[in-house]
Image (tube, rainbow, N blue to C red):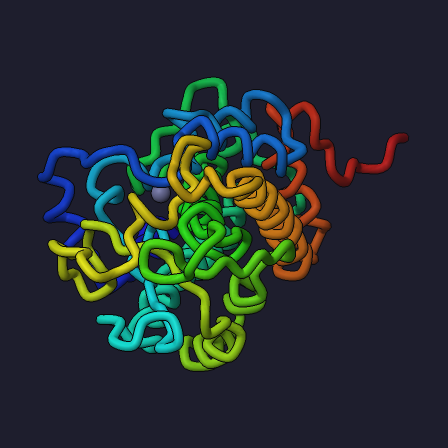
Amino acid sequence: MPHRLTVAVGFATAVALAALMPPGPAQAFTGGNHEEITRAALPWQPTTLAAMSDARDGAVNANDHGGYFQQGPLHCDNADYLAPRYAPHYPRSRDEATTELLACIRTSVTRFRNAVRAADGLVDAQGKVVADQSDLSSPCTWKETPGRAKCNVLEQLGRGWHQIEDFYAHSNWSDRAAPGPVGVANPPGLARTDVAPFLDIRRYSGMTDAEWTGDARARIPADLTTGCYSDFDSTGVKTEDCSGRITHNQDLNKDTTASPRSKTGDNFRRAVDGATAEITRQWNDFKAELLEAYPDHRRGEQMICAIVHDDPAAQCRGQQPPQL
Ligand SMILES: [Zn+2]
């Protein structure tokens, strides 16, 4: 159902407005870093893997192009917060920061649901891969216009995974502070090596918004922060001034090895490792969801086969009629 692929997000108008604006400076893991992370996480065949991961044209990088680039929730931006013991009058509250982070998670939850629905088109009612819907002999375009089912699935997954990868580069979840006093210019680092429990996208996709946001709120550490960036927040307001706040550019991002925060210890590698483990989890969870959602005639299994293989019509035979 093509119309069901539309993403219902509150800042759609801002997306449309931002599409008219010129692109900003490079933000987020560079396309090359997104590619490295995505390739490391996905055991897919080459053409399909390139369609998802390519540094410029991959689905996972689509959120860094056009108007999407300026939408903070698509990069987990503006969820900055510093507790009173570090900054007595930090200009943002914990709750405001959490609201921005939840907006980021929400975009992934929506994309996950879209991807599960789009996968339905890969396989017919008898469990046979639909050849023309799973064909990648010509490239997909990531324009949110329904096309081949495989392109639809890749676009929804890629647009849902981008911000999850960004989270590890844009937050202090996995990094460490520099030596010296902790403060706005040197936020605390949580040094976590596990995947974030509030990015449990599959589980959240089966819950109401009130249910999953309540669950996520309880799991977000008080000292978690991302960076203020001059893009649109979840309410569609453009952040013009990050003064007095933890900034993406100067204080926190690990988008490249050259960023200030990457210079402390192995912070860059910690972000890459966290994001890679996370996408591994997200792919495994998506597979599990397909198996559960489409059990009849092993359709879920065939959908997975159609996603990971470059020539599914030939490589995913499914249930064959008995040979005489
Ligand atoms: Zn990004």
**Rendered position, 189 above or below 128:** below
Q: Nearer the viewer, residue 241 or 182?
A: 182
Q: Position of residue 295 (x, y in %)?
A: 69, 57
Residue at (38, 67) in percent of width and height = 102
Q: Nearer the viewer, residue 148 or 268?
A: 268
Q: Nearer the viewer, residue 177 or 10?
A: 177
Q: Is residue 13 visible?
A: no
**Rendered position, 75 above or below 19:** below
**Rendered position, 204 above or below 192:** below
Q: Position of residue 225 (x, y in %)?
A: 40, 62
Residue 21 as seen in the image, left or right of residue 9: left
Residue at (58, 30) in percent of width and height = 39
Q: Position of residue 267 (x, y in %)?
A: 53, 43
Residue at the farthest front position = 180
- Residue 148, quarter of the rendered image: top left
**Rendered position, 218 above or below 74:** below
Q: Quadrant of the C terminus?
A: top right
Residue 151 as seen in the image, left or right of residue 95: right
Residue at the farthest right position = 324
Q: Nearer the viewer, residue 134 or 243?
A: 243
Residue at (50, 44) in percent of width and height = 121
Residue at (67, 23) in percent of width and height = 314
